[in-house]
Image: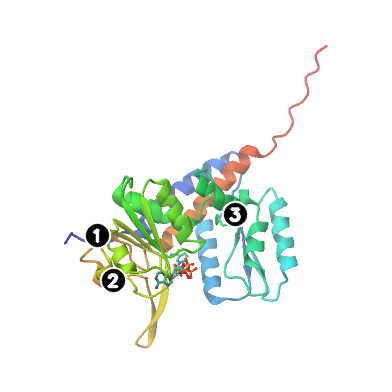
């Protein structure tokens, strides 16, 4: 048994945000005010909370945020129209479309409409493809935040065996791509995997992104493994609800080398990385924006 270590995602996020704030100030001195447009369609209460938190973090970093709250019956054409307008607006550097969308809107079509240069969530196929190719693109915030927590905890990840539980487009698959890029040996588990606990028990690194409360307990974990718990599950505890992860934290804690808590682990890093991506998008657009033409020199 190793000494368990709780990974402090809030402290790690505070470090990222402090650097973003410094870099935003430097960009503003060059006359560029980074700006994030957030689109919320409908009144999903959880989405409203997420959007409010993102806007608050942006304000703390001096990133301009513009909220576009659209009604639940907004048509796909109207949503795409707004995205095209924001794509064309040079003052907007990042566009975030809060998910999930109402059922009548085609999610992939909406995400694909966002300019890859402004796709701060990293969900556009051009950015997902670039990530797989190892290009320096805007990568999804949650997996990028997980990688940072892993590097803070383990340093070099080369050669380690990582098991990612879950294969969604927004967490599991990009997580596997990032781990592969860091020279890990990667196994991805999903709902059809056979003997998942035995496979997981081989891992030096476990990233859990399933959405099932406390599915992974000590029996799934090799002693000394580092566990990143992405899951956010609301459970009833007596007469109140509380958040738990996909990992049974109390059972895992004595076994692991380090583990993220829920809440206070991956969640704060996701928002911090969104701010980082908005800054990166603004820096890149500032570099590529056409500069005012220099006056012509006439040579006689
Ligand atoms: P999805 O529902 O999109 O994907 C869940 C994945 O888990 C699927 O690939 C599914 O497999 C797999 N799965 C389901 N059951 C099992 C099982 N018994 N064994 C192994 N794999 C299984 O979820 P997301 O990836 O969007 O989110 C996962 C969790 O992370 C959720 O709790 C979500 O709230 C949380 N989350 C947290 C974030 C944060 O910032 N902390 C950000 C994003 C998500 P299959 O493909 O076969 O169906």
- Image position, residue 16 (x, y; %): 42, 51
Label 3 belongs to which residue? 125
The answer to whether mark 3 and mark 1 are in CB contact below 8 A is no
Q: Gap between marks 3 and 1, in whole Å? A: 37 Å
Q: Is residue 51 above or below residue 177?
A: below
Q: Is mark 3 within 8 Å of ligand 1?
A: no
Quick one: quadrant of the C terminus?
top right
| Quadrant containing ligand 1 | bottom left
Look at discs 3 and 1 and give the one toward the viewer.
3
Question: Which residue shows up at 28% across the image and 56% down it?
Answer: 204
Precedes in sequence: disc 2 or disc 3: 3
x then y, percent, for residue 75: 73, 71
Q: Is residue 272 something that shows in the picture?
A: no
Q: Residue furthest bottom?
A: 239
- Residue 209 at x, y = what percent? 42, 66
User: What is the quadrant of residue 232 in the picture?
Assistant: bottom left
Q: Say if 211 sits above or below 120 in the image.
A: below
Mark 2 closeness class: few <14, some 14–19, many ≥20 residues within 10 Å: some
The residue beneath circle 2 is 217
């Amino acid at each position: 048994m190793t000494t368990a270590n709780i990974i402090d995602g809030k402290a790690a996020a505070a470090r990222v945000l402090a650097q973003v704030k410094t870099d935003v100030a430097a960009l503003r001195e060059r006359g560029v005010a980074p700006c994030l447009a957030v689109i919320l369609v409908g009144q999903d209460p959880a989405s409203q909370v997420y959007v409010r938190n993102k806007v608050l973090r942006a304000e703390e970093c001096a990133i301009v945020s513009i909220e576009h709250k659209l009604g639940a019956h907004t048509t796909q054409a109207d949503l795409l129209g707004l995205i095209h307008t924001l794509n064309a607006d040079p003052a907007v550097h990042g566009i975030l479309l809060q998910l999930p969308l109402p059922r009548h809107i085609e999610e992939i079509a909406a995400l694909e409409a966002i300019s890859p240069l402004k796709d701060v969530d990293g969900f556009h196929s051009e950015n997902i493809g670039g990530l797989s190719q190892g290009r320096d693109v805007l990568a999804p915030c949650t997996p990028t935040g997980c990688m940072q927590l892993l590097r803070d905890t383990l340093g070099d990840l080369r050669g380690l065996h990582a098991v990612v539980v879950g294969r969604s487009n927004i967490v599991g698959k990009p997580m596997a791509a990032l781990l592969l890029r860091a020279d890990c040996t990667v196994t991805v588990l999903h709902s059809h995997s056979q003997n998942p606990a035995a496979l997981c028990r081989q891992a030096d690194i476990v990233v859990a992104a399933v959405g099932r409360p406390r599915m992974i307990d000590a029996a799934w974990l090799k002693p000394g493994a580092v566990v990143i718990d992405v899951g956010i599950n609301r459970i009833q505890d007596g007469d109140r609800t509380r958040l738990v992860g996909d990992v049974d934290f109390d059972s895992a804690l004595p076994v692991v080398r380090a583990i993220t808590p829920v809440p206070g682990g991956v969640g704060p890093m996701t928002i911090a990385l969104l701010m980082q991506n908005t800054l990166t998008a603004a820096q890149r657009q500032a570099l590529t924006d056409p500069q005012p033409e220099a006056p012509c020199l006439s040579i006689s």
